[in-house]
Image (tube, rainbow, N blue to C red):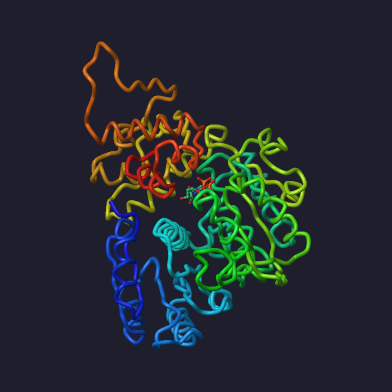
Amino acid sequence: MADFDCCIIVDDDEDILVAARLALRGLFREIVTVSSPDKALAAAAGRSPDVILLDANFARGATDAQEGLALLDQLLAADPEAIIVMITAHAGVNVAVDAMKHGATDFVSKPWENDRLVQTVRTAAALRRSRRAAPAGQAASSNGAPLIGSAPAMARVHSLIARAAPTDANVLVLGENGTGKELVARALHDQSLRAAKPMVTVDLGAIATELIDSELFGHVKGAFTDARADRIGRIQAADGGTLFLDEIGNLPLHLQPKLLTALEQRQVTPVGANKAVPVDIRVIAATNMTTTMLRDPRSFRQDLLFRLNTVEIDLPPLRDRREDIPALIDHYLAHYAARYGRTHSTVPPETRAALVHHDWPGNVRALRHAVERAVILAGDAPLTPDHFALLPNEPALRMTTASSAPDLNLDRVERRLVEEALKKHGYNISAAAQELGVSRAALYRRMEKHGL
Ligand SMILES: Nc1ncnc2c1ncn2[C@@H]1O[C@H](COP(=O)(O)OP(=O)(O)OP(=O)(O)O)[C@@H](O)[C@H]1O
């Protein structure tokens, strides 16, 4: 089941169109490729795509991205909510910065790694989805999805967001996977004085360790074997706006002093460059590390922590705020019923009780997936706990026992393995993905598939 509806890819290079289509086909029900700028507007107008992947340069040999930026402006004028990811290439480092300033959501540099392309586009598409999901007036942020929750711990979160957002203070968001850390980051940015500028996300759990340095700080041509062109770092791309460092706990210890220096001196030096570039950013970081792990200097430098956590927002796990579960169910029920053309408007009381009683180790993300799955499976019949495929609260998962024949159903075995890996690693997605031998993005796909 593809996660999103439609992606439009605009590029004059057939090879890029084919490569991008192949890489992204698992994410979208429909992928439309367009090879000339003049057809892009019509393609977008008719479809309301989740993401438009847009090449910066069309005219052969052009590197100044004028055509791409002009088209970016036109697409955004036609749909100010459009989510556009710019494809930048041999162009100077400024193209990515310019694109973000013109309103692009993100950028990918050619040649890309498929996993990274998928991750970037998935994040962008999720942003589009959350913008659409926000009913007018309910949004916690000007254009983000609503952060639902009125339990006392959430009231504190809302109040901290409101107070911290308009300041330039760095914010550290703590919480288990799926508790809404990214949503909080988005709300902070949207309610900040930097809202009109980009929020650039770096998911440190999704980038291979050896690439983090150049991803954050950029590099100059020739800095290392694969550095065939200058590449802008994400810190620089966030200039004027917000840098969201997701899964900051995955920042390798040896790069922590470099980030600290960049934050203190407000400048970055791309790998291989001899000149620093000034940057003006506000940093929001998030992690699922426990406070104890975070305060352990063997895993995290305390001086960097001190820089990042001027304000700390602690998101409670869903099992500690069960009173919010009914509102979350209703919200996602309305959302998915509309999406799949179903008539469900409520969840019967006994089903609701089972959902409130469930521990939700995957937190709100898992609840959201469970509701989507139930809406799909139930058709127009009343929703029962079975439709939500809840696993017992106390895990008693056994692969096989001597007395029972092994269950070799591939789908169920996969679900069990994913579930076991998640539990073993306390729902740390990066660690579970590593143990399973798949990328983080691939693990997310399987979690969604199995409603975990
Ligand atoms: N309070 C909430 N109200 C509505 N939806 C929520 C809430 N919290 C989380 N969600 C939804 O749950 C999903 C996961 O949220 P999000 O990505 O922000 O979590 P996260 O803590 O950043 O997860 P991870 O650590 O795994 O990256 C998203 O689809 C988000 O919209």
Of residues 390 and 149, the one nearer the viewer is 390
Residue in the image at 32% along x and 23% along y: 399
236 over 342 or under it: above or below? below
Q: Position of residue 445 (x, y in %)?
A: 36, 47
As drawn, is 34 to the left or to the right of 258? left
As drawn, is 201 to the left or to the right of 384? right
Residue 133 visible in the shown view: no
149 over 425 or under it: above or below? below
- Name the outermost residue toward the top: 403
In the rendered picture of this protein, how many numbered marks are placed on residues? 0
Quadrant housing residue 401: top left
Residue 138 visible in the shown view: yes
Of residues 418 and 142, the one nearer the viewer is 418
Q: Position of residue 229 (x, y in %)?
A: 52, 73
Quadrant housing residue 35: bottom left
Q: Quarter holding the C terminus?
A: top left
As drawn, is 271 to the left or to the right of 70? right
259 over 238 or under it: above or below? above
Of residues 418 and 357, the one nearer the viewer is 418
Of residues 438 and 321, the one nearer the viewer is 438
Q: Position of residue 105 (x, y in %)?
A: 51, 69
Q: Position of residue 155 (x, y in %)?
A: 64, 45
